[in-house]
Amino acid sequence: MIIAIDGPAAAGKGTLARRLAAEFDYAYLDTGSLYRAVGLGVLRAGGKPDDDVAAAAVSLDLDPALLGDPALREERTGDAASKVAAMPEVRSNLMEFQRNFSIHPPGSKQGAVLDGRDIGTVVCPDADLKLYVTAGAEVRARRRFLELQQRDPATKYEQILADVEARDARDTGRADAPLKPAEDALLLDTTELAIDAVFLRAVDLVKERL
Ligand code: DC
């Protein structure tokens, strides 16, 4: 069983993917963390995230320690990730690991849940279930703001909204594997639907496929 979950930043896809993997005892891969690790690797080396050569080199030999780095979740890392993710060479360097994970989930699990931007369209076009989780930009920015404000009280909502909108534009506008729902994806809008309701709906959909 391969479950592909795509959608824009802060739509709730990570929470949904993690809960589904726990519910069915499947392996979970947050593919955004791979792009974040590449972005962070470039920043740590003192480079700029729009440097293709530096990003390609980091993605070719990704240091696993970066995946556990607390800075992975920072806004500036997300921004760098969205820049390196537009580079075809970076995407192709990260592809094999993702495909392999979906076909041979670690721990001999019976299934895999992958979340990202192009899982249903490019990485796993034959996934058994494809979900596209979305919500309005303001709702997503508000959620991200409330989360970040706990760590840094100086966080400004307007700045977060601008970041979310810039990232949406970059992720949907790039030429290679842009963010878009697969033709056979089911849309789940979390603007007004609470995550618990989305989770229960997704559990039913997985059970139908089992
Ligand atoms: O989901 P996230 O915010 O951690 O993702 C960070 C960036 O990585 C996002 O802006 C776009 C990119 N990404 C991608 O292009 N393809 C994926 N499958 C996952 C993430």
Image (cartoon, rainbow, N blue to C red):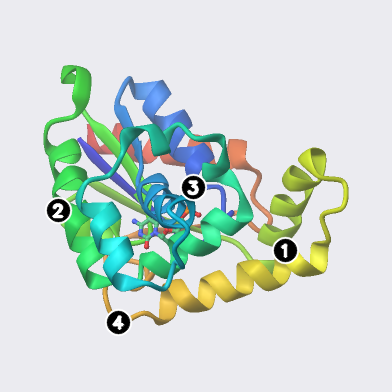
Q: Nearer the viewer, residue 107 or 202?
A: 107
Circle number at residue 160: 1
- Give the residue at mark 2: 126
Q: Is residue 189 visible?
A: no
Judged left or right of residue 47, residue 192 is right
Q: Position of residue 131 (x, y in %)?
A: 38, 53
Give the farthest residue toward the front. 46
Q: Amino acid at mark 4?
A: Ala
Q: Would the CB of label 3 be found within 8 Å of ligand 1?
A: yes
Q: Secondary structure at mark 4?
A: loop
Front label number (4 vs 3): 4
Task: Decide which of 30, 86 is in the foreground and name it.
Answer: 86
Kindly report which numbered mark, 3 or 2, lies closer to the viewer in this rendering: 3
Image marks 1 and 2: residues in contact by CB distance under 8 Å? no
Q: How many marks?
A: 4
Real-space Cα distance between discs 2 and 4?
22 Å
- Up the image or down, 56 lies above or below 149; here it is below
- The CA span between labels 3 and 1 is 18 Å
Q: Quadrant of the C terminus?
A: top left
Left or right of 110? Residue 34 is: right
Q: Secondary structure at mark 2?
A: loop
On residue 13, which mark appears? Answer: 3
Q: Earlier in the sequence, mark 1 or mark 2?
A: 2
User: At 16% across and 19% down in the image, what residue appears?
Assistant: 108
- The residue shown at (76%, 53%) is 145
Mark 3 or 1: in front is 1
Dot 4, how many residues are within 10 Å of its Cα: few (below 14), some (14-19), or many (20+)?
A: few
What's the residue type where badge 3 is placed? Lys
User: Could you tell which of marks 1 and 4 lies nearer the N-terminus?
Assistant: 1
